Amino acid sequence: MKRTLLRGTNAAATMAFSNAWNYCVPLTVLAVACLVRTAHCQAAVQTENVTVFEGATAQISCRLQNYDGSIVVIQNPRRQTLFFNGTRALKDDRFQMTLFTTRLVSVTLRNVSVSDEGGYFCLLYADATHHQVATLSVLVPTDTPAVEVKQDAVEGGESELTCVSPRSKPAATLKWMRNGKEIPGVVSQQQNGKTFSVSSTIRFPVERKDNGAALSCEASHPTLDVPKRVRHYRLEVYFAPTVRIVPPTGILREGDSLSLTCSVTGNPLPLNIQWSKINDTSPDRGELTGPTFQISRLSQSHNGTYLCQAQNDYGRASDQYTLLVYDPGAVVETHSAVPYAVIGGVLALLVFTVICVLIVTIWCSVRQKGSYLTHEASGLDEHGEVQEAFLNGNDASQGKKEYLL
């Protein structure tokens, strides 16, 4: 975009402008003539629009054509004069006149903020007033978004998470992801002056298996040198404890040692694990080491049911184990009874086999006898037919022949 600067050709004009400066006459009044002769203004001054990141340094340049030493003025978007020719007019050390020649006037602005955004005027006071405006645009990249949790996620309930990009220009784009898949969220946007605050909220039911699930919120912005900024979040689901007693293996005899481990899960993990014996106090020689309950030498007095309990803010759980200590005699009798049980089983199998064989034999005998009686009855019927034919006077040989056939 081109801007026009004014130039003066005589001492009277220079003196007039000097007086105007001394008495703080607004230079905007002197630029009215440029609006009438736009084509001529554009031919005298040229500018370019500038876009920078917040915090960077912007360079505002005015290119002059046929400059003859006329007055050059640089103004900010509020029409405050920054430089009068090469002299600083506004006490703002962030602005520096870096170049002033017959062809180019250049001003730099350090540590740019969004409040500096707008049009910067290059004015040339000559026979007529020429001006052009260089538009400064300031971009605000989004920072890594933050995750806000409205309330704790409890098993069987619902989790609500909000991803927030508090400040950006233009507005950032937010997206929730889990296991490579997008989770649709409710997006809201609020403008704060020239910047934007963006948030995305997701709600979903949670179970115990969701504890530790990895989620991420991705913020995209056209100013980023990387595709996106990502905030990772690990979901924490609170749930009541579960308790399981790990029993020993094999038969426990008098004099053996016992070790019971209480396996506990829960979030938060219960720190206080309680052991007790149902309908009795804790037995003698019992030792507790964290979740493990131990008895060094077992006896019949230790028989009974042992209970392990755990509790957190979301519930209580327990498990029990019944201990039965055998004396050596009982164990021997138990082992000696095993062969008799095996022998009894074999005898029962033999008796069952014999019964099956008898049933099959009787069934086959009855079937064979029935077949014999049926054939005998069939022979009597044929003999009766021959006799009847003879009595009726038919030829005996013919009847015999028919019979034989």
Image: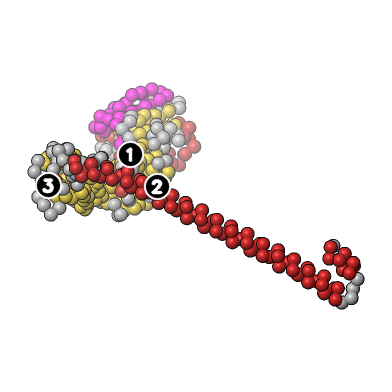
Q: Position of residue 39 (x, y in %)?
A: 49, 37
Q: Earlier in the sequence, mark 1 or mark 3?
A: 1
* Number of the front mark, 1 or 3: 3
As rendered, which of 130 and 356 lies closer to the eye? 356
Q: Earlier in the sequence, mark 2 or mark 3?
A: 3
Label 2: how many residues lie within 10 Å, few (<14), some (14-19) or many (20+)? few
* Number of the front mark, 2 or 3: 2
| Amino acid tagged 1 | His
| Amino acid tagged 2 | Val
Q: Are marks 2 and 1 in contact (CB under 8 Å)?
A: no
Magenta span:
85-113
Instruction: Say whether residue 60 is magenta.
Output: no
Instruction: Say whether residue 106 is magenta.
Output: yes
Q: Tag 3's secondary structure?
A: helix
> In screen coordinates, is 193 left or right of 297?
right
Q: Is residue 126 above or below residue 347?
A: above
Q: Position of residue 96 (x, y in %)?
A: 30, 27
| Image-quadrant location for residue 131 | top left
| Amino acid tagged 3 | Ser
- Asked if one can make out residue 158 in the rendered structure from this viewpoint, the answer is yes
Check disc 1 and report the residue beneath it: 232
Give the numbered dot on residue 346: 2
Check disc 3 and report the residue beneath it: 301
Residue at 90% across, 73% down:
394
Quarter of the image with the C terminus in it: bottom right
